[in-house]
């Protein structure tokens, strides 16, 4: 993107200002990056002010995003967070406009005018009501505040984002056809529209997943735990589990005192050829129980998701106090949240 800006804008400036036009174009590319940083810092500062932690900021010349540690729990927080970025861009544009008006004609004045124009465009465009734009987050907050359902707000704002993406490319083609847009401008508009469509689609899919959060019950999702003593072969452990009507149970390994000390890795067990299973002790394909994640049986919905995110793993012990209720496999949780995962796996 920086190279594209330097070539397109720099070539125009070079006609009247020579090679220094490319240096000015490079300064413009850098000022865009700084502007995006300030825009995202606006989001980050408001998030922290409202008690939401910020993991980081990712920048590119098509925009950027601020990654928060958790989603806002109130529509008001979502609204303030969404408006902060466009407000910063508007203020930068306004200050740059005043500065350019007060400056005498010069190359620096040209640069300041471009900074003013780009930030005002970003402020206005970003305020359009469609995810993943900031205006889309504001629309989601409004729908959320009206009907109390954030998921519905996300779907509405996601579809609105798709409309904005389509209109972006349509308007760009019209401007190009009338000679008001260059080929480079059309390419940039197409990239923006494609990015918007992807972001809007991801938001809609995420909302569909979130709508299934109330179904998350770790006790119901957990597979029963079938424990065998250390030294038991994999073939014998599987035979005993099947004999007791628990072929889908997770396999645990107990020491001589009967204490659970390890959990057989499901993928590792499945990878052992059937003819070798009588010679493979379960503890050789198991992980120490202390390295297995733990989820309290009383957690539900989003709290389960948060527990999984805090300690990523492919399986978790579901516990009530010191008692193990069962083993929750991450794949089972994913299939509950996204039934398409089951179909694709099949």
Image (tube, rainbow, N blue to C red):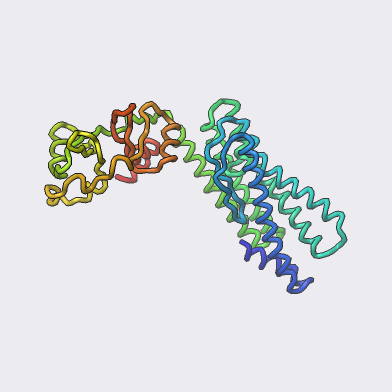
Q: Does residue 109 lie above or below 223 as drawn? A: below
Residue 29 figure quarter = bottom right
* Image position, residue 323 (x, y; %): 29, 28
Judge by depth and name the residue closer to the eye, 138 or 280: 280
The x, y position of residue 117, in whole percent, is 75, 53
| Above or below, 220 relative to 341 | above
Residue farthest toward the bottom in the current orientation of the protein: 18
Q: Position of residue 130 (x, y in %)?
A: 60, 41
Does the rendering let one see residue 342?
Answer: no
Q: Does 217 appear above or below 118?
A: above
Viewed as shown, does residue 314 lie left or right of 263? right
* Quadrant of the image containing the N terminus: bottom right
Q: Is residue 296 left or right of residue 260?
A: right
Name the residue at 36% across, 43% down: 313
Hey, which quadrant is residue 253 in on the image?
top left
Residue 231 visible in the picture: yes
| Left or right: where 226 falls relative to 177 | left
Q: Residue 231: horizontal and vertical position, in percent?
A: 15, 43
Residue shown at the point (20%, 35%) measured from the top left = 227
Q: Residue at x 58, y 45 (%)?
A: 66
Image quarter for residue 257?
top left
């Amino acid at each position: 993107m920086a190279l594209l800006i330097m070539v397109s804008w720099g070539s125009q400036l070079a006609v009247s200002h020579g090679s220094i036009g490319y240096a000015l174009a490079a300064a413009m590319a850098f000022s865009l990056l700084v502007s995006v940083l300030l825009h995202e810092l606006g989001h980050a500062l408001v998030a922290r002010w409202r008690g939401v932690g910020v993991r980081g900021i990712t920048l590119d010349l098509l925009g950027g995003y601020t990654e928060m540690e958790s989603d806002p729990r109130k529509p008001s927080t979502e609204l303030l967070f969404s408006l902060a970025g466009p407000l910063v861009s508007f203020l930068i544009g306004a200050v740059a406009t005043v500065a350019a008006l007060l400056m005498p004609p010069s190359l620096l004045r040209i640069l300041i005018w471009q900074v003013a124009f780009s930030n005002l465009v970003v402020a206005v465009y970003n305020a359009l009501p469609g995810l993943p734009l900031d205006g889309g987050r504001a629309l989601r907050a409004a729908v959320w505040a009206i009907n109390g359902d954030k998921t519905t707000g996300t779907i509405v704002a996601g579809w609105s984002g798709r409309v904005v993406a389509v209109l972006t490319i349509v308007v760009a083609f019209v401007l190009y056809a009338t000679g008001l847009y260059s080929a480079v401008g059309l390419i940039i508009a197409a990239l923006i529209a494609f990015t918007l469509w992807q972001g809007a689609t991801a938001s809609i899919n995420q909302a569909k997943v979130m709508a299934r959060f109330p179904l998350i019950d770790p006790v119901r999702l957990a597979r029963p735990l079938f424990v065998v003593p250390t030294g038991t072969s994999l073939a014998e452990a599987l035979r005993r589990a099947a004999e007791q009507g628990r072929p889908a149970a997770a396999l645990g390994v107990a020491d001589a005192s009967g204490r659970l000390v390890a959990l057989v890795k499901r993928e590792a067990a499945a990878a052992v050829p059937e003819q070798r299973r009588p010679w493979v002790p379960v503890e050789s394909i198991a992980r120490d129980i202390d390295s297995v994640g733990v989820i309290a049986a009383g957690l539900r919905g989003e709290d389960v998701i948060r527990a999984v995110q805090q300690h990523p793993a492919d399986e978790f012990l579901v516990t009530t106090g010191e008692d193990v209720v069962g083993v929750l496999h991450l794949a089972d949780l994913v299939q509950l949240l996204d039934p398409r995962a089951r179909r694709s796996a099949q």
